[in-house]
Amino acid sequence: MFRRQIWFLLLLLAPGGGIFAQAVPTPLSHFGFELGTDRKLANWDQLTSYYEKVAKASPRVRVDTLGSSTMGRPFIMLTITSEVNQGRLEELKAVQAKLADPRRVQGPDDLNSLLDQGKTVVMITHGIHATEVGGPQMAARLVHRLASSNEEEVRDILENVIFLDIPSLNPDGLQWVVDWYNRWVGTEYESAPLPWLYHAYTGHDNNRDWYAFTQVETQLTVRAAHNVWHPQIVHDIHQMGSDGARIFFPPFIDPYEQNIDPALIAGVNQLGAYMAAELAADGMKGVVINNRYDGFTPARAYQHYHGGVRILSETASVGIASPITVGRDDLVGGRGLDATVSTWNFPWPWEGGEWGLPDIVDYMEAGAVALLNNAARNRRYWLENFFNINKRAVDGWDRWPEAWVIPANQDNETGLAYVLRILTTGDVEVHRAEAPFQADGVSFPAGSYVIPMHQPYASFAQTMLEIQHYPDLR
Ligand SMILES: [Zn+2]
């Protein structure tokens, strides 16, 4: 009898009427400090054990190990969505796969039903540059909020969005940087830089690998996340210099690369400007858009060739996790921006002063939540735009050829294998000719590789195979 009463009480107390097997552990209880505290950083061991606990306690969160990092650490992805959506994840993945390949959609009724059923798939990636420590700390705080809160905003996101969270694109670097920082914090060497590269092979250029796929972290993200889920929105969280704007969102500056769908570019503009507006509405100063970073290279933007928008955010850094003071006279804008003057793309200048990890994590979290809100509220727009982008690719663009042919019997077998590996990793369909054939008056032997340009990821093939000319901006 007594036990039954206790259960009854627990049911009443469970927020929103849901029954949680156990309470979602708070960051404070797990790490011993609030995430986003000056001079406090959680390392990868602590973060991954936290995610295991949260996934065990919350039916909204699952954690998958996609593989191992370069140095053998777990490379993980969280899938966060409502409990109902978690129960039909495979079905929702199948809906997304059809929207990603319009050849599989049978007419307007089929399309309408897919648009009704589908969810906006959002991927957020953190910490590829390991000294930019804010992202992975914020990630754990945001996961806790999404796993435990029953605010209307959170429920709306969970219902309409499948959120794929890669809490670190560089677990090795994260562990090294945090352990290094923790070793020297409180001494005269506090904030000293890590004296070796934060990615074993590529250092900072780990974020130039999204077309060559040379590193295991890139391969895991592309093969086990992008190509499985085809996200409509990808948000890559970074940090920049300390002495200008507090945070950057798109629109990017020109140029965009010429094979990116125009409606995709417009989607980037819409979403980035929306995020900036949400931060301004919260009174967060120093938000700049359209002032730096272009949209030219596939080396950073895999998704621009796979139907998804890429939102880059860059938050002003500190001394790793140690606060800094920026004097008003030391503020610099760059690219025509005066960091003390209000302009259309920088409406609310920050006046200078103290800036620390708590600010970084707050700004990042506000940006991520704004993005998830946009994804939830405009679910149908994101799905329709995604389908239309993929449809235009399948229909073929005027400036693209009917097909690319790579002749068989190449002397450079290694080079050929490398190109084919890039194309197929990028989800491009490559066929082999069963018999000799002629095209445009040229004879090709049997075994030649044919890449028809009426396929969803034709823009990736075109960008990889044609010569690129970066415009002279001087
Ligand atoms: Zn970065």
Image (cartoon, rainbow, N blue to C red):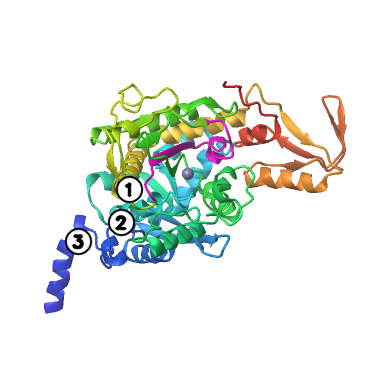
Say what amino acid the circle numbered 2 marks: Leu
Mark 2 — residue? Answer: 35
Q: Is label 3 or label 1 in front?
A: 1
**Residue at disc 2, secondary structure:** loop
Residue that numbered label 1 is attached to? 361
Q: Are marks 1 and 2 in contact (CB under 8 Å)?
A: yes
The correct choice, above or below, for 366 with respect to 11 in the image is above
* Residue type, mark 3 in image: Ala
Q: Is residue 87 visible?
A: yes
Q: What whole-number distance in Å separates the C-alpha atoms at marks 3 and 2? A: 25 Å
Question: Between disc 3 and disc 1, whose residue precedes?
Answer: 3
| Numbered tag placed on residue 14 in the rendering | 3
Reply yes or no: does residue 142 show up in magenta: no
Badge 3 or badge 2: first in the primary sequence: 3
- The residue range painted magenta reads 295-319
Q: Secondary structure at mark 3?
A: loop
- Looking at numbered disc 1 in the image, what kind of residue is underneath it? Val
Residue 1 visible in the snapshot? no
The answer to whether residue 279 is left or right of residue 208 is: left
Give the Cα separation between the discs numbered 1 and 2: 8 Å
- In the rendered view, tell whether residue 296 sits above or below residue 133: above
